[in-house]
Image (cartoon, grey):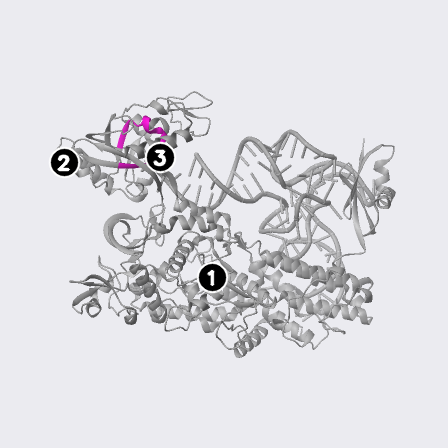
Amino acid sequence: MAKPPEGTPDRYDARAIERRWQELWDREGTWQVPGPGDPGFDPDVPESYVLEMLPYPSGEPHIGHLKNYSMGDALAHYRRRRGMRVLHPMGFDAFGLPAENHAIKTGEHPAVSTNKSIEEFRRQFLSWGISIDWRRQFGTHEPRYYRWTQWIFVKLFERGLAYRKRAPVKWCPKDQTVLANEQVIDGACERCGTPVVVKMLEQWFFKITDYADRLLEDFKLLESWPQRVITMQRNWIGRSEGAEVVFQCPEPPVEFPVFTTRPDTLFGATFFVLAPEHPDLERLVEGTPMEERVREYVQQALKESVEERADTQREKTGVFTGRDVINPVNDERIPVYVSDYVLMDYGTGAIMGVPAHDERDFEFAKKFRLPVRPVVEPADRDASADQAFVGHSEHERLINSAQFTGMTVAEATEAIIRWLEGEGKGHRAVSYRLRDWLVSRQRYWGAPIPIVYCEKCGMVAVPEHELPVLLPEVEDYAPKGKPPLAAAQDFVHTSCPSCGGPAHRETDTMDTFVDSSWYFLRYCDPGNDQAPWDTQIVDYWMPVDQYIGGVEHAILHLMYARFVTKALADMDLVGFLEPFANLFTQGMITYGGSKMSKSKGNTISPSTIVERYGADTARCYVLFLGPPEHDADWSDDGVGGVHRFLGRVWRLKSAGGDPLVSPGLDDLSGAALELTRKVHWAIQKVTADIERFQFNTSIAALMELVNEIYRVESDLRDDEAGEHALSFANATVASLLFPFAPHLAAEVYERMTGARVSEADWPDADPALLKSDTVTVVVQVNGKVRDSVEVDADVDEEELKRAARERPNVQRHLDGQEVAREIVVPGKLVNFVVR
RNA sequence: GCGGGCGUGGCGGAAUUGGUAGACGCGCGGCGUUCAGGUCGCCGUGGGCGUAAGCCUGUGGGGGUUCGAGUCCCUCCGCCCGCACCA
């Protein structure tokens, strides 16, 4: 095609187009969506809730946000044009440490810096043109929101699901606060990387362990979640079945229950180990000659960091306590040790040592020269004396185990549990790795925990009508061993809501993950000031039909939100058990092969790209980069390619005929027919690819279609049918491009048709135009492609074989050889097998 | 150590059910438009041999199933992710 004629608006001015449509959408409230009870609500329209994880507003949005919201927005647009009422809201996860640390450094109130960030995020999201119902926006730091976060806390407290206890907890010395187990990564603070230490502290917990089984079972209610996210949660919950077995200490008389997944190996127990933190340890050794050494060892063990202690490579250590316990199955006395390889966190903090069948116990036995007694016979190899045998298939049978000898492992497990239960020495048990969720934080920038301590009444929840408990102003945000709120005297001193007597407030704030564990409910009914939501409205929209976000939330946020939803369902506050029916986890965008970070100076700012190329280019590019679930590396050159493509769309020129109606098969021939077929192919391809989140190939298909339009355009300008085909093709490009490049597509669509693309139905492919009258059939000889032949689509097999044989190159390869077999795949290929 | 995923041109990546490997884009090369171009348009582009027609070869390595394998099976190698003294 030659250069566009002088004087036409040939330059693709993304900035002007985007400004125009953003203003129009805002003015007309295009993306506002009514819910039940709102004017214009029609109950017969199917609903869809499309949600991207809410952003944490810090600085300005990064490329990951752009990708996240570009995907969600594409889907929201697509579903709207499929006739659905789509809830597509936005909010901000505004409480949290970075804003507070910033405040400590600069003195700027966290609310000030957070609100600035929110404004910047909002400004950029608007500049991206994402189709959000902005009337529903909120920040989790606003009293109108955290009032209800506190309300939920109180509800959980009333049900015994929020409780306070003294427990060994993970403490970050840098951030000066406790952390949830889920926030400790490799023994270090998730936020700042400082190695955490264990402290005995009284803290607030949510009883998520009550829901362990339901969190596992209800995976079956999820429609489509990535398998690996489910696996990660399953591993985190860590359910194990086995038995609790009681070992009796004769002197002093103490009972030690242990949890084991292998009750079948009870006869192989040759020693017993307590965790250094075990509460009965002190009593066991008090006044004995071993007291000094045990105490020393415990001191040593407690000093270790979480990370050091988790190191599986190092040699086992421990100390004999001088005491014995009795193995309930054979009344044998076995020695009790203390060792740091036994964790107080899991099971009962005590274990039976079965060195023959447990690798860790084996190592310990070797170190302390303890006997190794095999009780399970390996099925197909000799029990090696220098390692533990851990096999427990149906082929392994018990030895050295009294009346259980000869049973398979499974039989013996059952029989021994039943025997223990009969003797009152143990019972069937299930153990979990999951711990209760520690939700209190000794920090400022969070929702205050709505609890008051009264001298007479004890712990009292702040009543509903007194909520929110407002976050007080303080002068110093820095924690100094005490939470910052403790310094706010007016805040701390209060009266008991129950008896009116003197009382003081809880000064810890809530983990920000509490804020984000219910925000998706608030979007449904954001203006409600009587209740956190109207159950009927929430039940209308929920569960979220498509949730999109980073895989880094696989455990934390996604598990907490599931737990809170279930707890609310149990209180009849919501009518569903799972918050997110479908989950999509997007991959990261890297730059130069590594994660973008300000400290490395390898960041790409979305605003730079938007300013240079426009939002449509930026959005299309992040989707075109590759499969959205994979990590992808940003390429500066690649953006230009997508921008060029959008420029080509911009320069499509209108033609005659009705652009909204496809020319029919009967009116078409030649290039016009081929182009119209390509259009219908693209409709089908783009539709199918959006449905399976393959935005990259959707865009590639549109590129193909546009290339085709440019190739044939000059041939089609001669007659009416050609003009019509062209006209329809151009309008359809704009229509299909809309979910990815909404401004440009709206502009081009309007130019081609005079209509609003956002109001147009999503196009349907005409099956008659998806088929071709002729097909290219590949001809192989012995599985090697030798030629291809163009035949009628409905040609019969014999005719096809004849045509295939006639190809000169096929003849050359068949020449003088005997055809042993002929394989025909209709419409695809013919393969001649010769000897 | 356990669990999961992935290996395709110079690069990012395509390839519903086994049926023309490399769509689309970047990069590179050629031609045209242009005063110029970091513009736009058209064409070419896995490797090797060949003037060409064409032939050989090719999806991490090796083996297998099949008329036919990127795709299915076995095995080895490499990379990534998750969990990790959980009894």
Q: CA distance from mark 2 to mark 3?
A: 32 Å
Q: Amino acid at mark 2?
A: Glu
Kind of residue sitting beneath label 1: His
Name the N-terminal-most of marks 2 and 1.
Answer: 1
Vertical relation: A142 (above or below) A407? below
* Kind of element beneath mark 2: loop
Could you tell me if residue A737 is visible in this image? yes
Residue A350's place in the image compared with A447, above or below, is above
Q: Are marks 2 and 1 on the same chain?
A: yes
First in residue order: circle 2 vs circle 3: 2
Mark in the foreground, 3 or 1: 3
The residue wearing badge 2 is A286
Q: Give the class, few, some or many, for how many residues have Cα within 10 Å of label 2's Cα (few <14, many ≥20).
A: some
Q: Quadrant of the C terminus of chain A?
A: top right
The number of callouts visible is 3
Of A627 and A262, the residue lying toward us: A262
Q: Which residue is mark 1?
A: A62
| A467 or A398: nearer the viewer | A398
Magenta range is A257-272
Q: Is residue A402 magenta?
A: no
| Distance of label 2 from label 1 (alpha carbons) | 59 Å
Contact check, label 3 and label 1, Cβ < 8 Å: no
Label annotation for residue A313? 3
Q: In the figure, A171 relative to A711: above or below?
A: above
- From the top left corner, tell me how far across and down residue A631 is, in percent: 52, 52
3D distance between C-alphas at marks 3 and 1: 39 Å
Q: Is residue A703 visible?
A: no
